[in-house]
Image (tube, grey):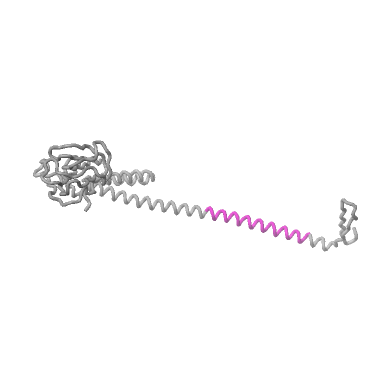
Amino acid sequence: MVKGKFSVIIVPHDIRKTRTFRVPYGVFYSILALAAVGLAVVLFFVATYGVMLIRTREFRLYKLQVEELAKRQEHMAELQRNLAELRAMNVQVRHMLGLDLPARDSLAIAAIARASGDGAQDLRREQAAMMRAIPTFWPVRGFITKRFEGPGSAGAPALHGGIDIAVERGTPVRAAAAGYVAEAGWSDDYGYFVQIDHGYSIKTLYGHADMLVVVTGERVTQGQTIAYSGNTGKSTAPHLHFQVMQNNVPVDPLKYLLQ
């Protein structure tokens, strides 16, 4: 080692000569200082970048949580809207069926809807089934020759328990609502007739048909052809006698049929 300098000797593994480099102390210490500064810069960059990565990950997690919360709020809002629709539908159906709507029923509906989405869906399906049971579809389109006439006195039977609709013979007669055929056959009064049970204590009757195309026990959908109009039974001209019964009591069909 020369005074004031470092000697760096490189010894190769082959037969080549060794090489010697002399580095002054000042240069050596300058290199050490630069290396130390570089290392410090690298460590600072790594530490800062690591913090940025952690914060970025936290931000993404926070963003996902916010999005999830927004979805839940939207879902809750939809449930509230569905609940309002169910309440309105329930009131409408009960009104059309002539049923009361106690306050506890509204509370029960709200409790079911709050309990779970499945409960609200079940309730919606039940309400939809009730709506399908209401005979709103005109079985035929024609001129009403005789309207419904209620009982003449308390407890007396209806004077005319349905409506008569004049149509040409062979006109398709369609189910006013979904249900199953409770009876299909012959009656001295109605000739060939079909009676459909729609559930919820609602039945409909179609009389004076020329031909039936359904049988007892068959399930039918709203608008399905069940017979062809005629002039059978106690009838003076081709027409359809259409009757709606609620709890086996005839009611005015025009109360249900949509205009």
Residue 103 at x, y percent in the picture: 27, 46
| Residue in front for this viewpoint, 44 or 130 | 130
| Residue in front for this viewpoint, 239 or 6 | 239
Which region is colored magenta?
32-61
Is 200 left or right of 65, judged from the image as shown?
left
Classified by dominant secondary structure, the portion drawn in magenta counts as: helix
Q: In this figure, what is the number of numbered marks?
A: 0
Is 49 left or right of 69, judged from the image as shown?
right
Does residue 81 lie above or below 161 as drawn? below
Which residue ends up furthest to the left in the rendered image? 152
Is 79 left or right of 201, judged from the image as shown?
right
Q: Is residue 55 magenta?
A: yes
Q: Is residue 39 magenta?
A: yes
Q: Residue at x 45, y 54 (%)?
A: 70
Q: Which quadrant does the N terminus fall into?
A: bottom right
Quarter where residue 39 is shown: bottom right
Residue 14 at x, y percent in the picture: 88, 51
Q: Residue at x 40, y 51 (%)?
A: 76
Quarter where residue 202 is shown: top left
| Residue in front for this viewpoint, 142 or 162 | 142
Residue 146 at x, y percent in the picture: 12, 49
Residue 198 at x, y percent in the picture: 25, 41
